[in-house]
Image (cartoon, helix red, strand yellow):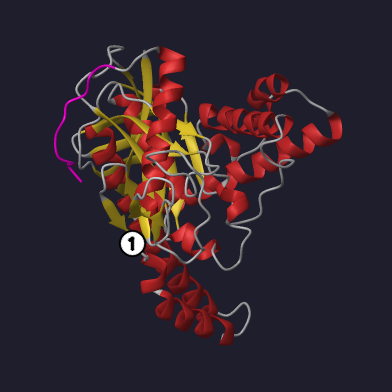
Amino acid sequence: MVLHRTYMFRIYPTKAQEMTLCETIETCRRTYNSFLDDKTKNGTGFKDQRSNLSRRRKEDKYLKKVHSQVLQNISSRLQLAFQSYDKGITGYPRFKRTGKYNSFTYPQATGFALSNGRLRLAFVGRVRIRQHREVPGKIKTCTVVRRLDCWYAGITTEIASNDKGDTLKLPIGLDLGIHSVVTLSDGTQIPGPRFLAKRAARLRTLQRSLSRKCPNSNNREKARLKFARAWRKVGNQRMDFAHKLSRLLADNYSPIFFEDLDIRKMTGNRQLASAILDSCWGMLRRLTASKAESCNGRVMLVDPRWMSQKCSRCGSIENPSHGTRTFSCRSCGLVLDRDINAAKNILKMGLERARVEAGPLPTPRVGKSSL
């Protein structure tokens, strides 16, 4: 089985290189809007758009300064956007205003090269890169991303995976929550990081400062950047937490059973939306699935209904009050933490589903939790 993995590295362009990167992104944005307008009004196919790029490059001096494969990738991005729209995943593709198009991609290795602490980008030059880890496998694509005042390069590689499953891992059920962001069926509880709550006062101060600035002034732009950097800090903390926790889960457990929660619908509750997003449930589930795949493990989703109300020992249904943190079963006398009881139910239901789909699981290694 072939896996594709993307590794993000910080790059440090010079002033001249940064200006070239900004001009490239702006040219790509205008080209994207032009392709979308042509598709909407004239129904021009994506293959025709790509084939007409050679003629357009001869007529447009800005297109001449951008690698041809980068321009072709813009049409591929738009094609993916329309495919998502046709499947009902996203809305109709929109025109990108300034600041809403912040990346471009070299789809083949002929447009870039990575060597000796430098990333060579066609039409840009050799850019200094902080390569903090090796890039395994065959390098396929490179995406340059602008995030406020920082630049990143996403190197996508193709690696071969051993199809043999790891028989030494313990199956585990995970209950996602707010008080404890993850509760494992073996009794381990990981408290929520609450990154947003810890920086809420700072964000409120920056928001008030931004609202007092005059529109279109330099001071307003400086305040906007400060506010955006503070939010970026929260996002980076959430990502770091999710990466580390998902790595521990993928390395020590398989299969891993999550509740199939509709997170987007749950965030419609205004009282819980901020806490749910701060717990990064969706990010954790997605990263765990990705890392488990590379470790020959599995992540499976189970029906979340009755997980908190069902007794994990006898299966009877109880109705504890919303604020109660302890589950008490009147049938068998089980008294257990509510989240641990739910995690055990998730594990039990997940194992039943796994046996139906793939037969009995191998005997796991028995040991203490590594978390």
Residue at numbered disc 1: 193
On the rendered structure, is 139 left or right of 62? left
In the structure shown, which secondary structural element does the residue marked by tag 1 occupy? loop
Q: Residue 139, percent across and down?
A: 33, 24
> Residue most toward the left?
367
Query: What secondary structure predominates along the stretch shown in magenta?
Result: loop
Q: Is residue 158 visible?
A: yes
Q: Observer-nearest residue: 24 or 138?
A: 138
* Residue that appears at 38% across and 43% down: 343
Q: Is residue 183 magenta?
A: no
Q: Observer-nearest residue: 88 or 23?
A: 88
> Residue most toward the right?
41
Q: Across the whole image, how many numbered discs are drawn on residues?
A: 1
Q: Residue 11, percent across and down?
A: 31, 47
* Residue that appears at 58% across and 83% down: 211
Q: Residue 296, percent across and down?
A: 30, 21
* Residue that appears at 51% across and 63% down: 321
Q: Observer-nearest residue: 359 or 177?
A: 359
Mark 1 neighbour class, 10 Å CA radius: few under 14, some 14 to 19, many 20 or more: some
Q: 291 above or below 220? A: above
Q: Residue 130, percent across and down?
A: 23, 46
The amino acid type, in three-letter code, at marker 1 is: Pro
Which residues fall within the magenta stretch? Answer: 362-371
Q: Is residue 239 visible?
A: no
State the image quarter where residue 197 is shown: bottom left
State the image quarter where residue 347 is shown: top left
Q: Is residue 364 magenta?
A: yes
Q: 302 above or below 340? A: above
Q: 128 above or below 297? A: below
On the rendered structure, is 217 left or right of 178? right
Quarter holding the N terminus? top left
> Residue most toward the bottom?
212
